[in-house]
Amino acid sequence: MARIHDLIRQVANQSPDLARDLQREVDVLSERRAFGLNFERHTPEEVELPGRPVRRGDKVHVLPPRGSMPKAENSVMWVVESIDRSADEPIATIVPHASRQGQTDAASQTVPLTELVVVAEFRDPIYPGLVSTGKVERGGDKPYHSVINAENFHALEALLFTHRGRVDAIYIDPPYNTGARDWKYNNDYVESDDQYRHSKWLAFIERRLVLARELLNPHDSVLIVSIDEKEYARLGLLLEQTFPAARIQMITTVINATGVIRATEFARTNEFVYFVSQGSARISPEWTGSEEELLWNLLQRREDTSRRHGPIKRLDQFYPIYVDDKSGRIAHIGKSLPLEASRVDAPAIPGCTAVFPIRPDGTEMVWGVTPGTLKDLHDQGYVRVSASRGKYSIYYLTSGKVRDIAEGRAKVTGRRRDGSVTAVNTTGRPVMPTSSWDRPSHNAQSHGTKLLSRMIPDRRFPFPKSLYAVEDCLRFFVADKPNAVIVDFFSGSGTTAHAVFRLNKQDGGRRTSISVTNNEVGADEGAMLRGRGLRPGDPEWEERGICDYITKPRIRAAIIGRTPGGEPIVGDYKFADEFPMANGFSENVEFFTLTYETPLRVASNRDFNKIAPLLWLRAGSRGRRIEDISRGWDIADVYGVISDLDHSEAFVEAIAAASDVTHAFVITDEDRLFESMANKLPEHVEIVRLYDAYLRNFELEAGRVAR
């Protein structure tokens, strides 16, 4: 090794950058394990940033001519030496990057600025911002889910600033490394015959798992990873090495009972799911045993003593229940009629039938509960209407059965189209789920592909997960965490966020999801777009990328209950909670695109509008976002920002008066001023110094990746 270090020192005299790259590789080799999973940690990946302005000193690729596929020379990295903006079309002078010398004979060349695309290596420090690209708001004061269009490695680095150690669950369905041309590595496809195929995949996954580990709450959290047989064994070893203190278990789950036919191989019916449990994370058991459907009671009292004009006067239990003649649902519950009033005098509602408790012989009876109680029961789904021969009967769950549901002796298993619950008595017991799953709800064709086609018709996405499979995986760990934070950084079509919506609806939770996906187009789609003379960065190209064309429309459709074309989504949700998809969900979501800022502009407070969403995310992504601090400071629902410490007294007073504020961001370069401010603010408020904490976070992470 001494000889190698001598040679590196000699190289450093000629090319310091190349010497540093060589030293990193030597350091990696020196740390190799004698036992366990050994693999090549390939040169960190690169990602092109179309749309990012080209600046002097940037690393760039030269774009291929429009209409042509990228070639080897388009992957050569250059550095922008200078930019001449005096001509009508700006021209850049570029030189080969030190680490790429030998890949081209050219010492330098001039290229139109529009023919260059900025490149970020994963060992480079990045300074991310977020730009909002839209939102859906149907959840009132609930916190917002986030969808981030970004390279997921860089998005994970950004989340380390906002959520380090605060994530309760991560669910990912990463590329399976099958050789299919549906994912990218290092700006090129990993071919099925690549001799480094497995180590490239491992290097790709490991870099992201290391960051994911930092996001998870070390005391109580879970990482869930879905995989097939191509890489499950290597993934298992990688998880053990990356999470040495965790409890790791792999289960098998049937996703297609009929099997996917593959030449010369067994038809594949299943996948594997790894559960990596940290700290006190525990699996919530399922109920099993004999179950009987909960019987509904007729709301009309039957006993002779319950006649309206009988000996026992129930003055508040004779009232009209208005049933909508089109939907068959209860539209309104009227007021009780005085004893002397005739039911024909009850107000009429157009399109509705007024139902009273009347025996077949015409005797007026009374309802089983008062109007106010019935309204409460109806709101909870404990009242239903039955129609027979043109007449309506009203049924309800009695107070004893409602109490059984509340105390666990009965459970709700779903909902009918009219909103009423289906429920069963249970005499069973809680049992742990097994390690082998064969559940109809996990069929990826029926509840993944077909479900997605209802939400975004005519838009194809390969192999979406079953919504209910992801829902079950998460429920085992977040059922008792109504405020859980759940991340998916391979979010694809957005199934994980959709599953969180369902979990929240089932128990009134306020869980939030963060979904990350890039905006690449599929191989076939890319060929079609290139044939039209388009390339990455063009608006027509970007609008067909996975985030803009699939993920965002699917999540929007799920919440509002309508397709991108504005039509109500056809069909019902199944299993744990049955209701029309057109009902949507009471949730809020905001869509973002990750940007790449310069540290100088950030430190000088010129990019606050890009950093503002990160501060809002760190404070819990709820309430108003502070986007303008031109007056020196501002306080929103749960956090405050101050940039002019001459206003520190007013800021501190306002923070102290706002009981819901949990974070304070202080923009200052002065240690003394920051310490003084920190001493004045309430102890329960987390104080973050800007932009020192922001810049240091990303510089440290880049240093760690470089190793």
Image: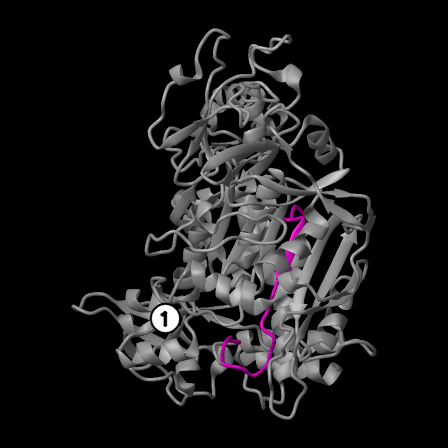
Image side of residue 254 versus residue 687, left or right: right
Residue 383, quarter of picture:
top right
Image side of residue 402 versus residue 657, left or right: right
Q: What element carries label 1?
A: strand
| First to last magenta residue range | 164-185
Viewer-proximal residue among 218 and 157? 218
Specify the principal SS of the magenta part: loop
Residue found at the very far left of the displayed protein: 88
Q: Residue at x 69, y 78 (%)?
A: 229
Image position, residue 292 (x, y; %): 74, 46
Image position, residue 165 (x, y; %): 67, 48
Image position, residue 52 (x, y; %): 36, 62
Image position, residue 485 (x, y; %): 62, 46
Residue 123 in sight in this render: no
Image side of residue 503 versus residue 75, left or right: right
Question: Is the C terminus in the top left, top right, bottom left or bottom right quadrant?
Answer: bottom right
Amino acid, disc 1: Val
Give the vertical position of 226 relative to 163 (above or below): below
Residue under circle 1?
117
Residue 333 in sight in this render: yes
Query: Does residue 166 show up magenta in the picture?
Result: yes
Viewer-proximal residue among 341 and 420? 341
Image side of residue 492 versus residue 62, left or right: right
